[in-house]
Image (cartoon, rainbow, N blue to C red):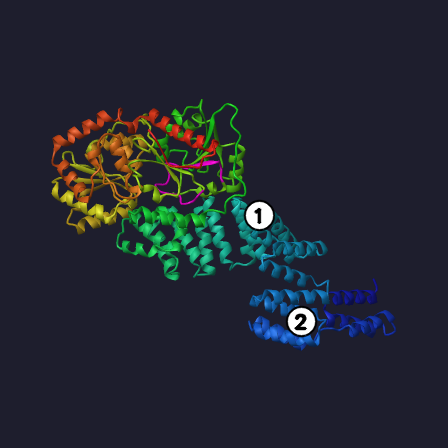
């Protein structure tokens, strides 16, 4: 190609892009070198005649006003220049950009349309017009412009990026992901496209791919705190705890005031077991953003785990909408108020659950006539919930029920409990790697009649997937001791003790009351006889042993005051507790000393395999329950192991479970009506060896005859509840409260 032809091509290209001065320069260079060339001279004359832009200095003045944030000045200058140069797409485009930044959308739209009329080939003007239409919620018009623009300029990465964002905003994730992927293929240096792609991949559960996208974003922009923070969340879900902490550290190095990263780092530290550091992180987050009451609630909850009660009065500050981001479980130990917990659940559900689905499942009846029941949990392994429920799964009438288990917890295939569960179900499906939408599609394809949530608002939950309607009937059972607070959940299984008449007001679900007790139990749980004796556990051979194996977060100063008074009044007695963490042990010993009790009278024991734990319980004399959150599985453990449980039923469901258990095992007198009676009963029993022997003998006689531990009749009651739920649905009746005798 000759030098002349190269200059003419460059000139025409510059002119087409609107770079008038550059085009002039190329034509003049051509004439300098080839002064008689008619094409260059004609083109230059035509360009001069068609010059529609103001002088560069005036354009620069307008650009300077826009970039410095003097948007009104930019708009005024644009109006002046547009009157003088009505065919300048540059002026109209700049004026539109200033109007768009000001939020004056109709005027911005008009300016961009004038720019396009002046130069239909100006791709940036079409892109800006589509942005303006989207801001006016005119999504289909914006999408149409983006697609036409991409068809004309297929390598225009900005248009694809903006189209991807538009599709994402319309809940069209697969299309959006494809456009983000195309954007980074066209422009590998497009940082925000990598970041947004990572967010979409994370949303659909493609965690490793999301981490890779975030890594590309931070490689391009090392100070991208949001990418580091989101990367940390995905690494946490992948179980890469130290890598997650490293990502959060990088986020905070880039932005020390990023409260989200601070709080997320605190959550990772909880999983790592460094509770004081986690508490410090949560409190730092609250300090930086006092409106973030969720950070405060998380700090208080972890302080409860280490039995640091110094800040408990701050709980009142967490009753704010922002605290809805924390699952309501964290509020349970601080206040015994079903109305309070109801409000918490409603607020949490409003944040956690997606909009209702467009369609509802309507499965065809099974060919064999069985009711298809799907249980969903992260705990299908050696876990407290399965200790209780293994008998239910074993005894289900498989001739009438098609039992399907859906697991999103750890894949511990060698776990004995998990192996046994597989044998008690028609199918066992791993769904941990599926998105909520994919789980919904799977559950509907399986034709579930009833979907049962065994987690609720507890750690590791994916309860929000029930918002997509996995089945026409959905049930909350055994997992969370309170309402989910969302209309997607139809029923909550309880009993007359845990939800007495009138208690329905604290639930969005309809209450199904089982006779005797709502809680499942397995009458075949093996008890390994203790071989160590009291001395082997650090207990006195002859002294009275009070016991509480509840988790430390359930212990509050009110219970502890009573327990210390009991130790003071019962000579030689001790309090046997579960060793949870060293900080709780230190704090409880200190609290005992402050109440005048020798700290050595608190005996801590570590956890042991479940059968061994059941065996050692017989070494204690009386289990002392906590108040706002009772012993649940731990109470059943104690009663099954032959250890009487003294409780005090409160107001909320979590505070009434142990009362239900002791009544169902035939020891109603162990449900004290108030704190004074609770303390007096414990003291009287500790001073009455004969009374204690009689109590233990009654418990031993009742274990295999009372309703609490009779697994087969209990399972038939649960099945009767499922049958009634299913019958109502088939006959077109809405869910309603009912009882199962």
Q: Earlier in the sequence, mark 2 or mark 1?
A: 2
Residue 572 locus on image (x, y percent): 13, 39
Taking the spot 52% from the left edge, 47% from the top edge, the residue there is 203
Q: Main secondary structure of the magenta part?
A: loop
For disc 1, the marked residue is: 173
Count how many numbered circles sit on residues in the image: 2
Frontmost residue, 541 versus 656: 656
Q: Is residue 670 magenta?
A: no
- The correct choice, above or below, for 695 with respect to 260 in the image is above
Other-residue count near label 1 (Cα within 10 Å), few / some / many at <14 / 14–19 / ≥20: some
Label 2 sits on residue: 91
The magenta stretch spans residue 477 = yes
Magenta stretch, residue numbers = 469-487
Q: Residues within 10 Å of mark 2 (few under 14, many from 20)?
A: many
Q: Is residue 218 visible?
A: yes
Above-or-below relation of 651 to 16: above
- Residue placed at 20% from the left, 27% from the top? 698
* Nearest the eye: 526 or 604: 526
Tell me the SS state at disc 1. helix
Residue 620 visible from this viewpoint: no
In the displayed structure, would residue 531 be above or below residue 165?
above
- Horizontal relation, residue 72 to residue 603: left or right: right
Judging depth in this view, the residue of 13 and 645 nearest the camera is: 645
């Amino acid at each position: 190609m000759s030098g002349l032809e190269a200059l003419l091509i460059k000139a025409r290209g510059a002119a087409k892009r609107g770079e008038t001065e550059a085009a002039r320069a190329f034509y003049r260079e051509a004439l300098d070198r080839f002064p008689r060339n008619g094409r260059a001279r004609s083109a230059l004359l035509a360009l001069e005649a068609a010059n529609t832009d103001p002088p560069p200095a005036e354009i620069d003045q307008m650009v300077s006003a826009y970039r410095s944030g003097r948007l009104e000045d930019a708009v005024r200058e644009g109006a002046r220049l547009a009157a003088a140069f009505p065919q300048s797409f540059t002026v109209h485009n700049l004026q539109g950009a200033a109007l768009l930044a000001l939020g004056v959308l109709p005027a911005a739209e008009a300016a961009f349309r004038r720019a396009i009329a002046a130069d239909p080939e100006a791709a940036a003007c079409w892109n800006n017009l589509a942005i303006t239409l989207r801001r006016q919620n005119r999504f289909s018009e914006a999408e149409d412009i983006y697609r036409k623009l991409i068809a004309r300029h297929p390598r225009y990465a900005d248009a694809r990026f903006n189209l991807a964002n538009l599709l994402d905003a319309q809940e069209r994730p697969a299309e959006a992901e494809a456009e983000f992927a195309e954007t980074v293929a066209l422009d590998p240096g497009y940082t925000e496209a990598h970041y947004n792609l990572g967010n979409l991949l994370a949303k659909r559960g493609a965690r490793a791919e999301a981490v890779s996208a975030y890594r590309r974003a931070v490689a391009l922009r090392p100070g991208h705190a949001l990418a580091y923070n989101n990367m940390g969340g995905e690494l946490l879900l992948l179980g890469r705890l130290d890598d997650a902490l490293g990502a959060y550290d990088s986020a905070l190095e880039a932005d020390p005031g990023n409260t989200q990263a601070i709080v997320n780092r605190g959550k990772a530290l909880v999983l790592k077991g460094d509770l004081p550091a986690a508490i410090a992180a949560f409190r730092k987050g609250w300090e930086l953003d006092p409106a973030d009451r969720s950070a405060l609630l998380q700090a208080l909850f972890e302080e409860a785990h280490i039995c640091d009660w110094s800040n408990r009065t701050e709980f009142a500050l967490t009753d704010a909408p922002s605290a809805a981001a924390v699952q309501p479980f964290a509020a349970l130990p601080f206040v015994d108020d079903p109305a309070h917990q109801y409000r918490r659940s409603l607020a949490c559900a409003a944040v956690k659950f997606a909009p209702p689905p467009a369609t509802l499942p309507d499965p065809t009846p099974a060919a064999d006539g069985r009711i298809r029941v799907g249980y969903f949990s992260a705990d299908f392994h050696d876990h407290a919930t399965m200790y209780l429920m293994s008998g239910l799964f074993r005894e289900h009438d498989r001739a009438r029920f098609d039992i399907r288990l859906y697991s999103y917890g750890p894949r511990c295939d060698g776990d004995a409990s998990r192996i046994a569960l597989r044998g008690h179900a028609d199918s066992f499906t791993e769904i941990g790697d599926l998105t909520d939408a994919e789980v919904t599609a799977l559950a509907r394809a399986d034709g579930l009649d009833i979907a049962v949530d065994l987690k609720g608002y507890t750690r590791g939950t994916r309860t929000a997937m029930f918002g997509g309607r996995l089945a026409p009937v959905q049930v909350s059972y055994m997992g969370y001791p309170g309402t989910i607070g969302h209309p997607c959940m139809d029923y909550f299984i309880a009993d007359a003790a845990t939800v007495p008449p009138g208690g329905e007001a604290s639930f969005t679900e309809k209450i199904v009351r089982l006779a005797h007790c709502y809680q499942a139990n397995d009458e075949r749980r093996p008890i390994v006889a203790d071989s160590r004796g009291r001395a082997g556990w650090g207990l006195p051979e002859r002294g009275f042993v009070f016991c509480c194996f509840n988790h430390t977060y359930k212990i509050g100063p009110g219970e502890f005051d009573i327990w210390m008074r009991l130790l003071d009044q019962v000579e030689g007695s001790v309090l046997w507790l579960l060793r949870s963490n060293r900080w709780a042990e230190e704090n409880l010993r200190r609290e005992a000393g402050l109440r005048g009790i020798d700290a050595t009278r608190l005996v801590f024991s570590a956890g042991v395999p479940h059968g061994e734990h059941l065996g050692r319980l017989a070494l204690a004399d009386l289990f002392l329950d906590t108040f706002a959150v009772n012993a649940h599985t731990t109470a059943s453990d104690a009663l099954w192991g032959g250890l009487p449980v003294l409780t005090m039923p409160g107001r909320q469901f979590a505070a009434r479970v142990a009362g239900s258990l002791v009544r169902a095992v035939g020891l109603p007198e162990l449900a004290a009506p108030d704190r004074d009676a609770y303390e007096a009963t414990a003291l009287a029993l500790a001073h009455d060896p004969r009374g204690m022997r009689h109590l233990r003998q009654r418990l031993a006689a009742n274990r295999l005859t009372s309703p609490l531990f009779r697994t087969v009749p209990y399972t038939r009651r649960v099945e009767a509840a499922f049958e009634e739920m299913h019958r109502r649905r088939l006959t077109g009746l809405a869910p309603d409260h009912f009882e199962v005798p």
